[in-house]
Structures are given as C-alpha cells and as structure tokens.
Image (tube, helix red, strand yellow):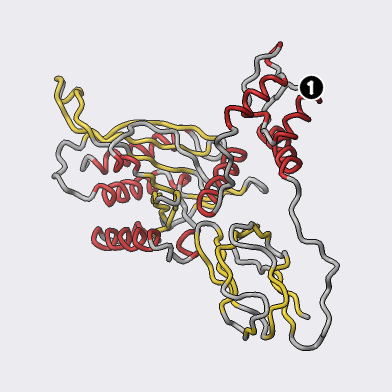
C-alpha cells in the first residue's frame, strides 16, 4: 500500500479545496494520470497521480478543505493484500466546531464579547457566533434572550461555508487586516481634455508607473517578520478583476516597459483567462503594486482600499463625472477622475504617498 499526501503546490500555500476527483475507488491508474482537481489561491490545479496501482482509498470530497501534507489517496500496488480498517472517518459535531471558531475569532479580532458562561454554552449549542449578536444586557453584555432572538432571526437562513475564490479572498483580507497599518489619501485628476472612448485603464497604468518612478518605496514588498523592505525595479501590476465567483487579482509583468497596444492586449488576455478560470498560478502572484478600477461599475469616488501583504500600496480609480471646479480662476464644469491611494504606513510616509499621487495626476492631465 502506498500513501499519497497532498504536495506543496508552491508559494507558501497552506491548504486547497477539492474541486472534483477524476478517479473512483477501485479504479486502476498509472503514473501522471490526472487524479484530482483542486483550487488554490484562486486557480484550479490538476494534481497527477504519483503512482500506478488500484485506488484503495480517497480522502476528501468536493468542497472539502485539505491542508498541505494531509493524506489524499491510497494505492494498492499489489504488494499488500490487507487494508487498514482502523481509521474512523467522520466529522466533528457542528455545535462544537462553530463554538470553538467563535471563541477563536474573538481572540483574533480583539473583540470584547461580554457573556456569562451559561450564555456562551447556549451559543455553542445553537452554533452561534457571539460576535454577531447585539447585546441588550447590563454594560453591553449578551443575554440568553439575545442569543435566542438572534437564533430565531437566522433560523430560516442557514449559514453556508465559503468556498473557492470567496474563501481565498476572505483569508487574504483577514491577513491584511491583521498585518497592515493602512493610511490613505485622496485627490482627483482633471480629465476634461480626454477624448471619449479612450482607454482609461491603460492611462491609469501609465500614471501608476509615473508614480512608482518618483516614489519607488510604494512599488515594493515588506517582510514584517524581519522588518526588511525590498524595492522592486520593474512594475508588476496587480489588476483587480471582478467575476461572479469573486475577486481575482491577476498580474501584468513589466508594465513600465510596455507600449499601450501591448498593455491593452495583456489586459484582454488576463480578463479572458480569469473568466475561463484558466489563468496559470504564476500569473496570480508576485504583484508589486495593485490597481482597482472600481469606477467601471459607474459608482464610487473615494475608497479606503485593502493592501495585501507583502505589497505596500494599492491605487483605486472612481467614476469619471462632471463637477463644478475652479478652472483658470473661475468656476467651471469639468470632468474629473477620483483617485484613492492606500499605503502601508509602516514603511511609506505621507510624503511618499503624496509624491506618488501627484505624479499620477500630472500624468493623467498630460503634464
């Protein structure tokens, strides 16, 4: 009997989600035959079989989260005729698991939930996260009635576990919230001179390159463990792409050295690959700075965006709208483009951010 543990799929991944098995119990397989499809960090990866033989056991079903190094499959290669039947396969009761997760979230988030042990026990029994319950007791404490009221309000709407892209996004945002010290500045560019139908995203990329030239500290990676900063010469731009499945951030390499036509082709290719869920893992990693062009949805001006470590900064672009502004010393209606810059204040100063945004605005306004 041979055991196959989930291998390290690279770049510090800790777990994957099983999408579907390509084999069934009892099937005979050969080396490198597709074994299982897993989703990891927003990309679907095919894992091949490392052995030839008969499938004696499969561990996990579609939707299960499997940590790296955990047992994935067992193969009977004919060397043994017996199987280990001592393993008990099952799940922990939902009430215990959810209760533990609730208390863990309290510790991680720093939230101070006031509740006596009996109320906490009731919440565990009902599978309720106390952080979500509105307190009505003395000094902001949660009572048993609060827990029961909340339970009744959500009883008809069962909770669903996050999977795939949504789960990966949640993990990323939690990491960013725990680690980054964010600060943000906002401004706008006068784009009245822009020709209708122009490529706004390409203009924004060009402007971000200009910002990186004057404030290279924002095009960098920061390692908080050893407090080291690596300023990157090339600009590998993360592009936020929204889909029905969730948010993807694909990477365009060396945007500082590419012309406008090449940038547009690259953007189109990335979007097509993301929508088809066919984008390679290497094109989802290694961004040095990120752009979120949320203005394409027709709403939004200012935003406090989330910097994902080890990056130092993210730029947001809102919706172009006409506004009354001062122009040549007099009020005028001009089209403006709102810009937001969020940066990690542990390594970048307000002056760094201001120089970056100023360079962006000058580029967008054709100065």
Crowding near pointer 1: few (<14 within 10 Å), some, many (20+)?
A: few
Number of labels in the image equals 1
Quick check: 60 above or below 310?
Answer: below
Residue 151 image position (x, y, % from top left): 64, 29
Residue 143: image quadrant is top right
Q: Residue at x 75, y 29 (%)?
A: 122
Q: Find residue 285 and report its horizontal and vertical position in percent.
A: 50, 59
Residue lying furthest bottom? 78
Residue 208: give x, y in percent of width and height: 35, 47
Horizontal arrangement in the rendering, residue 195 relative to residue 150 (left or right): left
Quadrant assignment, res 277: bottom left
Q: Quadrant of the N terminus?
A: bottom right
Label 1 element class: loop
Front-most of 149 and 175? 149
Q: Quadrant of residue 327?
A: top left
Give the residue number, with chain letter if any, for mark 1: 116
Q: Is residue 203 left or right of residue 183?
A: left
Between 158 and 111, the one nearer to me in the picture = 158
Residue that extends furthest to the right in the rendered view of this protein: 86
**Relative to 47, residue 206 above or below:** above
Task: State the quadrant of the C terminus.
Answer: top left
Q: Give coordinates of residue 69: x percent, y percent.
A: 71, 65
Q: Residue at x 32, y 50 (%)?
A: 205
Q: Is residue 326 left or right of residue 151?
A: left
């Amino acid at each position: 009997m041979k055991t196959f543990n989930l291998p390290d799929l690279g770049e510090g991944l800790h777990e994957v989600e099983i999408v579907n098995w390509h084999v069934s119990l009892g099937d005979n397989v050969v080396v490198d035959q597709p074994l299982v499809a897993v989703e990891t960090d927003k990309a679907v990866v095919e894992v091949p079989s490392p052995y030839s033989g008969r499938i004696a056991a499969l561990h996990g079903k579609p939707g299960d989260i499997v940590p790296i190094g955990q047992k994935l499959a067992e193969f009977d290669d004919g060397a043994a005729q017996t199987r280990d039947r001592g393993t008990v396969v099952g799940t922990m009761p939902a009430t215990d698991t959810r209760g533990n997760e609730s208390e863990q979230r309290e510790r991680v988030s720093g939230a101070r939930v006031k509740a006596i042990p009996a109320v906490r026990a009731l919440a565990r029994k009902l599978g309720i996260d106390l952080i979500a319950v509105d307190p009505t007791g003395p000094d902001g404490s949660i009572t048993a009635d609060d827990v029961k009221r909340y339970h009744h309000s959500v009883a008809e709407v069962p909770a669903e576990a996050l999977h795939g892209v949504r789960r990966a996004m949640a993990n990323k945002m939690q990491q960013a919230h725990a680690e980054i010290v964010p600060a943000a500045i906002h401004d706008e560019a006068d784009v009245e001179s822009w020709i209708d139908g122009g490529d706004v995203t390409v203009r924004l990329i060009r402007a971000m390159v200009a910002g990186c030239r004057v404030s290279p500290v924002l095009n960098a990676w920061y390692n908080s463990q050893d407090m080291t900063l690596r300023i990157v010469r090339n600009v590998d731009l993360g592009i936020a792409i929204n889909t029905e499945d969730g948010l993807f951030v694909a990477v365009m390499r060396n945007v500082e050295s590419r012309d406008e036509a090449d940038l547009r082709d690259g953007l189109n290719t990335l979007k097509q690959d993301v929508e088809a869920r066919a984008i390679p893992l290497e094109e989802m990693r290694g961004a040095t700075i990120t752009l979120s062009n949320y203005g394409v949805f027709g709403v939004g001006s200012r935003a406090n965006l989330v910097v994902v470590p080890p990056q130092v900064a993210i730029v947001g672009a809102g919706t172009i709208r006409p506004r009354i502004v001062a122009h040549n010393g007099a009020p005028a209606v001009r089209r403006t483009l709102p810009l937001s810059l969020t940066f990690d204040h542990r390594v970048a100063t307000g002056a760094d951010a201001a120089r970056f945004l100023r360079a962006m605005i000058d580029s967008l306004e054709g100065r």
